[in-house]
Image (cartoon, rainbow, N blue to C red):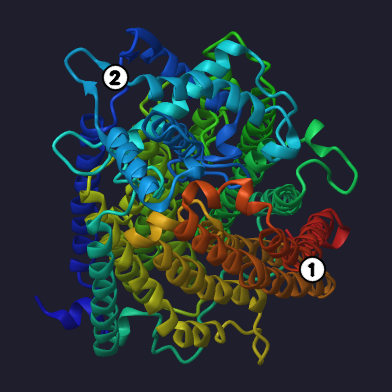
Amino acid sequence: MDTSQIIGGDEKLSPWWRRILILTVVIASAALVYITAHTPEISPPIPEKVINVADNSVIATKEDIQDGQNIFQRYGLMDNGSLWGHGAYIGPDFGAAALHREAIILHEEYAQSEYKVAYKALDEGQRAAVNAEVATLLKKNEYNPQSGELHLTAAEAEAWKTSPDYWEDYVKDPSKDGGLKPNLITDKTELRKLAAYFDWAAWASIAQRPGQTHSYTNNFPYDPDAGNTPMPGAVLWSVLSALTLLGGIGGAIAVRDRYPGAGWVSNMQKQLPSRLVPGQATPAQRALGKYMLVAVTLFFLQTLMGGAIAHYRIDSASFYGIELYKIFPSNLLRAWHLQCAVFWVATAYVAGSLYMAIGLRPKGDELANSNLLKWMVNGLFAAFVVVVAGSFLGIWTGFLDLFKGSSDLWEWFGATGWEWLEQGKFWHFLLAVGLFGWFGMLFWLGRSSKNENKDDRALIRVFWLATLAVPLFYVPVLFIGHKTNYSMVEIWRFWLIHLWVEAYLEFFATTLVGVMFYMLGIVRVKTVLRTVYFDGILFFMGGVLGTCHHWYFTGQNQMMFAFGSLFSAMEVVPLTLMCAEAWDFFSATKRDTDGGYSVVHKYAFYFLVACGFWNFVGAGMCGFFINMPIMSYYEVGTMLTANHGHAAFMGVFGMLALAMVVLVLQNLSSKEEWVKLEKWIKVSLIGTNIGLALMCVTSLFPGGMFQLWDVMTNGYWHARSAAYTKTELALGIEWVRMFGDMIFILFGSLPAFIFALKAWVGLFSKKSKEIA
């Protein structure tokens, strides 16, 4: 096999590019499918009965614990706190809080029985002895797989019995629970079942897995008072991941240096005829303008909700004198905040891809200019509006518990309650159908025609492949059942949150940018295909099995440390190469001129450059920092996770979505209209990037570092509780975030909204109508 054919040169693009990409996807996906299929066998068991051995009474049943999980979902508590580190950051980690509470009760019990004094009155040696006894008791696994019974001592049983009162007190007062609806749960039976679920999660996090010396959650969370400390494997695989990163970057840069044709390098000296010309659009393309208005409106609303949620972290009882929790409790706003993020980015991608797919049709093509296509675009838009509105309304009614008494309705039409997947299954199903409909339209638009050139056909096939992956890998969200074990829930959740986003959506985004460059005439099709294949190989090589870093502590075995750490390190490699390609990328954009020296789509390009920067910083640097097992053990669910999430999602997918918004709306506007619109998007470009940078640098990152220190000093439960989050230091850092948030909203999302609104209104002007 001649590598010169694979990497570059003027020869025909080698078929080995496609073969290696397919082979990479198949091997990585097969391993991930094996992990998924193996998970039910190793998940923490849910006992049929939890029994107090002192009097042989039943404390809880399997049905109680499973119902407790449904109550956890129904009241949206995953958008308040977290479980095993996954969820929201306003409230505590419920499993960590339950574990520490049980450890404290056992400390007192042992201190009184052995020394006849309170635990605090013990000297250092006596405390060490009590701590050792408690740790031994908690780690001893008294679950009998044959009978399905979990046996507890009288002291452990007492912790379970008094747990409902503890959680009732927590969900009663918005000033203590982070702004939940007052008296959120008052039913004693529901409180008992919810408490049983949290206590089961605590048991799984400390009881040793049969035949092993660590717990079902690999000793997470860190709680020295309970005897939970990091495993040696967490340190070992963290070191090996750093070596993998260095080796991967070195190898990739060597390939990039030896074969520069693997990037955006092109021997073109001038621009080819562009198919993305401002002021020239078909009726169907003009119909896409409202998509972008809706996308940016959702973006603006998302930032407003984000600001309100940040304030809830400081003062959950009052929003500058307004009792906001009575109308919009914090968990509802956070669920909407996350769904806005998904919907606005997806809407922009759908509209951008449809615009370019229509533009790939031959000039004067009957289909591209038909009213049928226009009405299909409008029909898809109506479907998305129904899904968005239905999802938002469903989450609201679900969290308000309006479907109480019906185990089916709340889960299907209300809110499933799982973070990032909050809307009911019915709305997930409709969204999946809509995404397949979008792919169907792209397939229809890209089908062969007599006028289609050879380069178009090659690019369209890759475009189809990248697009099909988006709806196809959204489907696993429907696999989460009513009684699915939480370990399995996390498997399916991160099939969407990570695999869908950091592998297939990254591949789609790269393809979308490549199609855009090709249509602008600034790169040849071979350059696009070569870059898409090369980046795709690197994305899938690390991104698919890199999903495992989310499963370190969710009931999996130590194999997750190996897969998650090594392949997550490899995810950084293509992001590093993007920095190496930055100049070639930027040089290519300068070919998009209006015949003079002015770059036509410069603001779309600037957002793409910002996307590349944040991809390296947010996804690469911040992601690798927290993905090493030993770091993740201490920091998961802290502000460092939020720092990575904001920098990566907004910085990468948000900036690309804004690039699509600018590209489409500029092409739908006349030159005269664009002169009036340009100033708004210029302000938005500066505001979003400066605001995001300030948000991360002045608040999220330093706040996360201080919280990380508190975890290592006092335990995970402490850093996630009001004992830390309400300290002057933590609150002061939260207040500092206001500067970045205000810049992001006032000079970022608001100007973007004004820009989109003015551009959409301009579509109805007389001059704009004459363009089509």
Q: Closer to the camera: disc 2 or disc 1?
A: 2
Q: Is residue 410 above or below residue 766?
A: above
Secondary structure of the residue carrying numbered label 2: strand
Image location (x, y in percent) of residue 46: 32, 22
Could you tell whether 489 is left or right of 412 in the image? left
User: Between marks 2 and 1, how big is the CA–CA gap?
Assistant: 57 Å
Image location (x, y in percent) of residue 250: 26, 83
Image location (x, y in percent) of residue 586: 52, 84
Task: Name the residue nearer the viewer: 668 or 407.
Answer: 407
**Corner quadrant of residue 771:** bottom right
- Tag of residue 150: 2
Q: Is residue 376 above or below residue 698?
A: above
* Crowd rating for badge 1 (residues with CA inside 10 Å; few <14, some 14–19, many 20+): many
Task: Name the residue nearer the viewer: 103 or 418.
Answer: 103
**Residue 371 seen in this snapshot:** no
Q: Earlier in the sequence, mark 2 or mark 1?
A: 2
Location of mark 1 (residue): 747
**Residue 767 seen in this snapshot:** yes
Q: Residue at x 59, y 8 (%)?
A: 405
Image location (x, y in percent) of residue 533: 31, 67
Q: Amino acid at mark 1?
A: Phe
**Corner quadrant of residue 363:** bottom right
Q: Amino acid at mark 2?
A: Leu
Q: Is residue 611 above or below residue 493?
A: below
* Crowd rating for badge 2 (residues with CA inside 10 Å; few <14, some 14–19, many 20+): many
